[in-house]
Image (cartoon, rainbow, N blue to C red):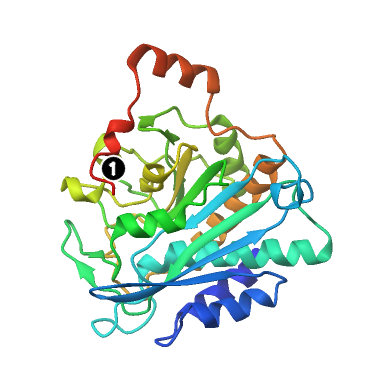
Amino acid sequence: MVMKYVIEAAELLDDPNVDGSKVGKVLEKYGLKPEIIRLSGDKGHTDLIKVLIPGSKGRSCGGDAPTLGIIGRLGGVGARPDRIGLVSDADGAIVALAAAMKLGSMRIKGDILPGDVIITTHICPNAPTLPHKPVPFMGSPIDLNTLIKYEVDPNMDAILSIDATKANRIVKWRGIAITPTIKEGYILKVSDCLLDILEWVTGSIPRVVPITMQDLTPYTVGVYHINSMVLPWLATDSPVVGVAITSEVPVPGCATGANNLVDLELACRFVIEVAKAFTAGECKFYDESEFKKLVEYYGSMKHLRRGFK
């Protein structure tokens, strides 16, 4: 089951010497061919990992089935030397890698999704921390705008962006939640299809994160963000939905011992089930006709990308 891959991904990342090469070798065991790009900045480096899981009718084999993007958003999997061990912020990477392992394993066994799935995340065991209220954020050795440009692939027709969302006083439950759909600067209604899948996976009332206009702006604007979960919208016109790992109390992104594997397993099952439905053309992230009406009446909201370079 999925928990096996969540445990494997967490154990893999809980290593002061983990890097893209080590992660790539594990992914290869599941029939995957990861692309690894080292990104360097003034505060160090991180290894971006991109992996394609080909679908039976996906674009990678000449088909026309839609492609789902899954992004594991984070600053880093560790905050060494300040903190020893896997940090809360690693949740996004754990879920993304576990989903890649599970989908690769399914493909080997013959359970092939109709469309392609592209999964990206990055590996940094010694990321810096940043001041943030009510508790500190995890930073990154690489500029956030640069990371987003690498995380988003132009072939992604829709994106699920997974991120630990515990460093706040707004989301007050433990488990997982989703955001409304973000498209081209518009905060759209929550997808009924995604709510259905969330209910089926969790067996509970679906939770929705209250995203605001501030959360859509580039970090360079300097206003409050709950986190960077929905910011991949800055680099794409495809719809983006955040998948939040949540908690009842504020938990710092740099806290260790705070990765709840039960919640991560829920998130992993959710993104896999969405991948099945979306690539089969059975799940919509937004209503195309309503979005067209909004743009015709109010105009483009892409100016909210100002500051994203």
Does 215 sit left or right of 35 as displayed? left
Question: Is 66 above or below relative to 6?
Answer: above
SS at mark 1?
A: helix
Q: Quadrant of residue 221?
A: top left
Residue farthest right in this picture: 110
Residue at 65 percent across and 64 percent down: it is 2
- Residue at 53% x, 17% y: name it: 289
- Residue 211 appears at what percent x and percent y? 33, 38
Residue linked to disc 1: 215
Locate residue 21, reporting x and y percent: 53, 81
The quarter holding residue 306 reads top left
Mark 1 crowd level (few <14, some 14–19, many ≥20, 10 Å Cα): some
Residue nearest the observer in this picture, 260 or 305: 305
Residue under the image location 26 percent in, 41 percent down: 217
Q: Nearer the viewer, residue 103 or 166?
A: 103
Give residue 267's position: percent from left, percent from top: 53, 55
Going by the picture, which residue comes out furthest to the bottom? 17
Kind of residue sitting beneath label 1: Asp
- Across and down, in percent, residue 231 comes to 36, 47
